[in-house]
Image (tube, coloured by chain):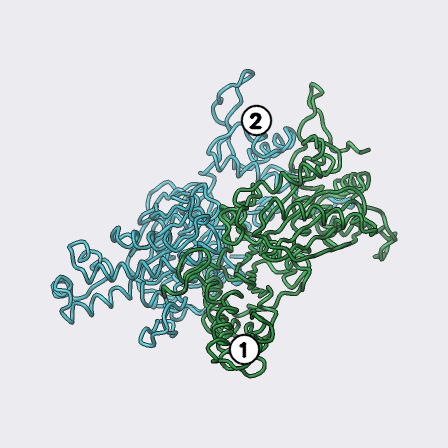
Chain colours: A green, B cyan
Amino acid sequence: MPSTLLRQTDGDGQPRPVPDEQLEALLAVLNDVRGHGHRSRPEIIHATGLSRAVVAQRVSELLDRGLLQEGALGPSTGGRAPRQLHFRSDGGHVLAADLGATSIDVAVADLSGKVLVSLDEPADIADGPGQILARVDELFQEALSSGANVPGELWGIGLGVPGPVEFGTGRVVAPPIMPGWGEFPIRDVFTEKYGAPVWVDNDVNVMTLGELRAGVAQGHRTVLLVKIGTGIGAGIVIDGRLHRGAQGSAGDVGHIQVTHDPSVVCRCGKVGCLEALAGGAALARAATALAQSGESVLLAERLKEKGSLEAADVAWAAGRGDARSANLITDAGHLIGEMLSTAVHFLNPSLVVIGGGVANVGDQLLAAIRETVYGHSLPLATRELQVRRSGLGSRSGVVGVSTMVIDELFSLERFREWVEVGAPIGMHGLAATGG
Amino acid sequence: MPSTLLRQTDGDGQPRPVPDEQLEALLAVLNDVRGHGHRSRPEIIHATGLSRAVVAQRVSELLDRGLLQEGALGPSTGGRAPRQLHFRSDGGHVLAADLGATSIDVAVADLSGKVLVSLDEPADIADGPGQILARVDELFQEALSSGANVPGELWGIGLGVPGPVEFGTGRVVAPPIMPGWGEFPIRDVFTEKYGAPVWVDNDVNVMTLGELRAGVAQGHRTVLLVKIGTGIGAGIVIDGRLHRGAQGSAGDVGHIQVTHDPSVVCRCGKVGCLEALAGGAALARAATALAQSGESVLLAERLKEKGSLEAADVAWAAGRGDARSANLITDAGHLIGEMLSTAVHFLNPSLVVIGGGVANVGDQLLAAIRETVYGHSLPLATRELQVRRSGLGSRSGVVGVSTMVIDELFSLERFREWVEVGAPIGMHGLAATGG
C-alpha cells in the first residue's frame, strides 16, 4: 500500500496509534461517498462539516488506497466544475451465506453489497455445523469459480443463522432448532481457511440490516421488523443502527408467552409461546388438523394431493373462501399484532416491516396485523407509523449478510487495523492467523 | 468571553462554522473530565484517543471559558506529576421542576446536577398550565433567593410532566391526566422570562436519565425502567442514551391492552389498558371495593379510619396477612411482569429498574414482577439480567430533570451555539429572544 499519510511516529520513532479523530474523518468521508454513490469535494465538506484541508487530505488517502476514484466532472455551481469522486465497490469482494432451517444460500457481493453470484440448495440445519459448514465452503468455492468477474481481494465473510447468536463471539447460544450448533466456533472455520474476518448473526438481524440499507427501511431511524417463517423473530433499529441487546438476543420475540393453555407446547420446551400459535409450523399443524378432521374440505383435498400441508396452503385456502383457514390467519395476525403493539408503545418506531415466508403468502395476515397494531396503540405512537411488507424478496438473506459484513468492515474498529497495518483487511486477517 | 481559539474565518474574513470535528474534540475533553470529576491531560489523551496537541488546545479553551480549572498535582507515573483538571460545576446553575399529578417539586442545581436548593408543595396538574406554571415560576424565584449560594449564570431550565411530550417541541400531546395542557407552549413561558433554553420531557424519561447518571443504572448500556405510580410508564436506554422514539412517545406502556374485558375502562377511554388494572389508581379502586364489600376486614377498617384508600394501603394490608390485598399486588406484578417480559425479549437489556410511588410501598410487587420476568424469558435474555428497585428516592424527579438539562447543554448542537456566539448559553438565549 503506497500511502502513509495517516501514519505517525512518536518522538522516539515508534509508530503510534492513529487518533480516533483522524480515523473518524477518514470514515466520514468514505461513508459519505459510499452512501451517495458519487460526491464532489464541496459536497463532502458540506455534508461532513470537515474543513476543506482535512477533506482534501482524507480524499487523497482514500484515492491512494484504492477505495475512491476520480470520475467525471460534476455539475458546476458557477466556478470550475468539481470532479466527482466514486466509491470503488470493485475494490474487493465479500462472501455471504444465509443458513435457513431447510436451505443454504450463498453469494459473492462487491463492496457496495451488490450480489454478483448466488447459489442456493436445500439443506437440513440439523445435520450440524461440521456437515453444513463444509457444504457452505464448497458453495463459496463454486460461486468464486463460477466465471463471474469477482473483483479484488476477499475483505470479509458473513453468515446468517436461524438461531440466537452472541454477536461479539459469533457463537450460537441455546438454539431451539439447531441441534449440535450451540457454542460451535463458526468463525474459526472460515477465518483459518480464508484469512478474512468473519461475522455471524441471526437471520432476522441480517434481514433487518438488508431492509435498512437496501429495502423499505431506508431513511428510517427507528424500525421494528418481524420475520414470520417457521418461527417468529424481530429485528430492531434504534437511531439508525441495529440494536442487538446486552447479550445479542434482542428481538427474540417468538418465545414470548401469549397463552397459559398447557396444550400449546413450543419446540423450545415452554408453554404458550407466540410462535407455537402463530408461526409457520403452527399454521401448518393447525391446517393439517382441519384437513384430517374434515372441518376444511379444501384443506382436506390439498392434503390428499400434496401429502403434507404448509402455511402457504392456509393462505391458499383462505383466498378461496375457506372460513376456517381465514380464521387461522386472522388469529395469527392478531397475536402477532398484539405483541407488536406492546413493542410499538415501548419504542415508538416510524416503521414496522413484516417479512418472512409466511408473511408473503397473502395480504390477509398483514391486514390482521395492521388492524391490531393501529387499534391497540395510542394516537401519538401511530400518528405517522407505517406498517409495510418487506421489500427485498428471496435474496433478502444474502443481501442482509453482505450488508452486515460491509457495515462491520467500514466501522471504526476494523478500519483502524486496516489503516495502521496498511494492508487489505482480508490480507491482514491472513497474516494474523498464519492461515 | 476571552477565547477565540476555535473561531475561524473564511478567505473573505467572514466567520465560518466551527467544524464538527473540533467541537466534538472540545466536548470529548469536557465530557471526559465531567464524567470523572478530575483528570490529568495524559488521562484525557488516553481516554479520548485525541492527540497531545489537540488535547492541550482544547483544555486551554475550556480553561479560558471557565468550564475547567487547574487543580492539585495528580499522581506521578515516573516523570513530572501531571496537574489535575477539574470540571467547574460552579460555572453556572440550572433550574429544574418536576410536575406530578398532585405535586410540584423544584430545585436549583449546579452544572454537575447536584441539587443545591429544593422546594416542593402539593398541586393539582388539572389546574392547567397558566396557574401551575405561574406557581413554578414563583417557586423558582423562592429557591433562587433562598440564601443558598447559587453559582454563576443560569444555563438552562428543565421541566418534567406527567404526560406524553413531543421532545423536539417541548409540547404535551394528548395527555390523559393533564386537561388544558395539550399543545401548550410550555417552553415559551420560561424562555421569555429567563432568557435560557428550556427542555420539557415526561416524568418517566427524566427519572430514567437520573438513574442512568446518578442512580442504579450507572454503567449500563441497555436499560428498561418502569415507573409505577398513579399510572404506569417506561423509560428506555439504548446504547447508553435515552430513546425517545420517532414522535417522543417511546415508553408509553400504561395503555398496552392486557385484557379484552369490557368492564376495565381506562382514563384514556380505551378498554383493558395495563394501568387500568395494575396502576396505583387501579389498586386504590380495587382496595376500596374490597373494603366496601367487606371481603377485606383490614381494608374496611383502614377505609373507616382514613376516609379513602390508596395503593400504599394495599401493601400495608398485604404485609399484615390480608390475602385479598396480597392477591391484588401479585396480580398487578404479574401483569407488569408480562409486559416487561415482552420488552425484555425485544430489547435484551442488562438491567430493569422498577420505580415510582407504588413500587416503593413494599417488596411483594417487586417479587411478583421479578418472578414473571425470569419465568417467561429465554435463558440468553435473562442470563445476566438484573431487576432492581430505583435508587434515587424522593428527589429522583428533580435530579432527573437537572440531568436532562445538563445532557442537552453539553450536546453537540447546543455547544455549537455557545462556542460560536462566545457567550454563556443562558445569555445567548436572552439575546436571541430579546427577553
Q: Which of A144 and A91 is in front in this view?
A: A144
Q: Residue at x 65, y 64 (%)?
A: A216
Residue B310 drawn at (x, y percent):
23, 62
Q: Nearer the viewer, residue A426 or A301?
A: A301
Q: Which residue is drawn at 52% across and 37% down?
A: B67
Q: Which of B316 and A152 is in front in this view?
A: A152
Residue A33 drawn at (x, y percent):
75, 50
Up/down of A84 relative to B126, above or below: above
Q: Which of A87 and B382 is in front in this view?
A: B382
- Pointer 2 residue: B42
Tell me which corner region of the image, top left, top right, bottom left or bottom right, holds residue A318. Answer: bottom right
**C-alpha gap between disc 1 and disc 2:** 74 Å
Residue depth check, mark 1 versus mark 2: number of the one nearer the observer? 1
The chain under label 1 reads A
Up/down of B4 relative to B136, above or below: above
| Circle 2: element type | helix
* Residue B420 - label: none
Tell me which corner region of the image, top left, top right, bottom left or bottom right, holds residue A342. Answer: bottom left
Q: How crowded is mark 1: few (under 14 residues within 10 Å), some or many (20 or more)?
A: many
Amino acid found under the numbered disc labelled 1: Leu
- Pointer 1 residue: A299
Tell me which corner region of the image, top left, top right, bottom left or bottom right, holds residue A219. Answer: bottom right
Amino acid found under the numbered disc labelled 2: Pro
Evaluate whether residue A50 shows in this view. Answer: yes
The chain under label 2 reads B
Residue B417 drawn at (x, y percent):
59, 49
Give the left or right position of residue A373, taking residue B2 as reference. Answer: left
Q: Residue at x 33, y 68 (%)?
A: B276
Evaluate whether residue B407 shows in this view. Answer: no
Give the left or right position of residue B103, taking residue B198 as reference. Answer: left
The outermost residue toward the top is: B78
Give the left or right position of residue B403, taking residue A89 as reference. Answer: left
